[in-house]
Each structure stands twice: as structure tokens, then as C-alpha cells.
Image: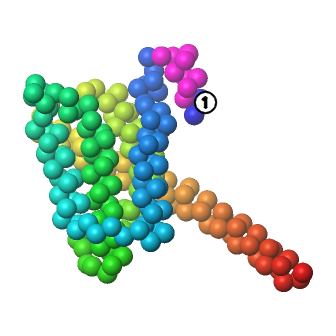
Amino acid sequence: MFVLRAGVLFWPNSPIAMIPGPIYRLPEFVIGMALAWAIRCGWRPRIHPVIGVGSLIAVVLIVVATIGRPPLHLLPSFNNELFTFAVGLALVSLTVATLNGKKSFFVMKWQVKLGEWSFAFYLVHATVIYALLRVVGPQPPSWRNLGWALVVLAIDVALSWALHSFVERPAEKKLRRWKDARDQRKREAAAAS
């Protein structure tokens, strides 16, 4: 992080300067962790998945429909907050339904695998977007941009897999072994007392 900030200070027009700092995403991360912790502790709100996913679809449609519309020009100021809320609602509703044993379209092996890679995806996706913007430049609004979106998605998924497989999983295994050994020593010390 220090290297990135130093690069911005000494080279303000660099590609690094275009990448937003991860600290700006902290509220979304904290909300996600709080929701996960609440569910882990037993919180089970009664929200049907149709309402959760429907809220997400509604927010996306509202955002798209209000782009550049004068009476609703203030709404885009809250797009990120609305989207964060809707994603949280969708995730909570789907998670609770899954925990209650209800089958869902969202519980397939490949989706579970993508879920395992999601933290790595979170770490790489903005960098890939900004790097591609730097290479090809901003594109005018067009349906042709769907092709660019697919390219970004493919790169993001490949990098997420690599980061998860070669960094996150090995680090997690090492940390678990360390914690298990420490817990074992504590148990042995308690038993010896």
C-alpha cells in the first residue's frame, strides 16, 4: 500500500493513481462481515429469496432507468449505497433459505467454487478494470461493451482462481496448522495442571 501511495505522490499521472484505495471499500466489507457474523450467531430473518433477489434487480433497473434523467438526478449519488443494501438483502435471504434446507438455483458446485474465490475476486477486479481502461481507454456507451465486460470477467476469474489456489489456501492451511498446534499445547498444559 505504501508503494502505491508513494507512486501516486511522485507520479500523479501514473496508472497507479487511477486505482482507488481499498480503504474506500471498507464500509461494504464491514457490512458483509457483520451480516455473516450475525447469521453465524443464529440470526435468521424471514426474507423470501424472491424479495432479496428482486430488490437487487429493482435497484439495477432503477439505476439504469435514472441515468441522465433530471427529476431523478440525485438518485445516482446513492447508487453505491442502494446497490450495497440490495446485495446484502439478496445474500441474507439466499443464505437463510439455504441454511433452512431450501434448494436454490444459487447452490450449484460451480457457484460454490466461485464463492470460495470471491475474496480473491474482490482483491483483483478493480485493478483489472482500471488496467484495461488504461490500455483501451474509456469506451462510449454501447452494447459492444458487453464483450469488454466478458473479457474483464474472464481475466478476473482466472486471477481469482490463481490467487485463491496459490496464496489464500496455502496461507489458510498454514495458519490453521499453527492455531491447531497452539490449541493442542494449551490443552496439554491445562491437562497437566
Depth check: give the residue in front, 8 or 98: 98
Q: Which residues are magenta?
A: 4-12
Mark 1 sits on what residue?
2
- Quadrant position of residue 67: top left
- Which residue: 44% across, 71% down? 42
- In the image, residue 172 lies in the stretch drawn in magenta: no
- Which residue: 56% across, 16% down? 10
What percent of the width, then of the height, locates residue 41?
48, 69
- Quadrant position of residue 141: top left
In the figure, is residue 78 to the left or right of 10? left
**Main SS type for the magenta part?**
helix
Type of the residue with mark 1: Phe
Is residue 154 in sight in this rendering?
Answer: yes
Residue at the far right: name it: 193
Mark 1 Cα shell of 10 Å, populated few (<14), some (14-19), many (≥20): few
Query: Is 184 located above or below residue 64 in the figure?
Result: below
Query: Is 25 located above or below residue 47 in the figure?
Result: above
What percent of the width, then of the height, locates residue 74?
20, 28
Depth check: give the residue in front, 112 or 32: 32
- In the image, residue 6 lies in the stretch drawn in magenta: yes
- Quadrant position of residue 52: bottom left
What percent of the width, then of the height, locates residue 43?
41, 68
- Which residue: 15% across, 50% down? 58
Residue at the far bottom: name it: 191
In the figure, is residue 45 to the left or right of 25? left
Secondary structure at numbered mark 1: helix
In the figure, is residue 4 to the left or right of 188? left
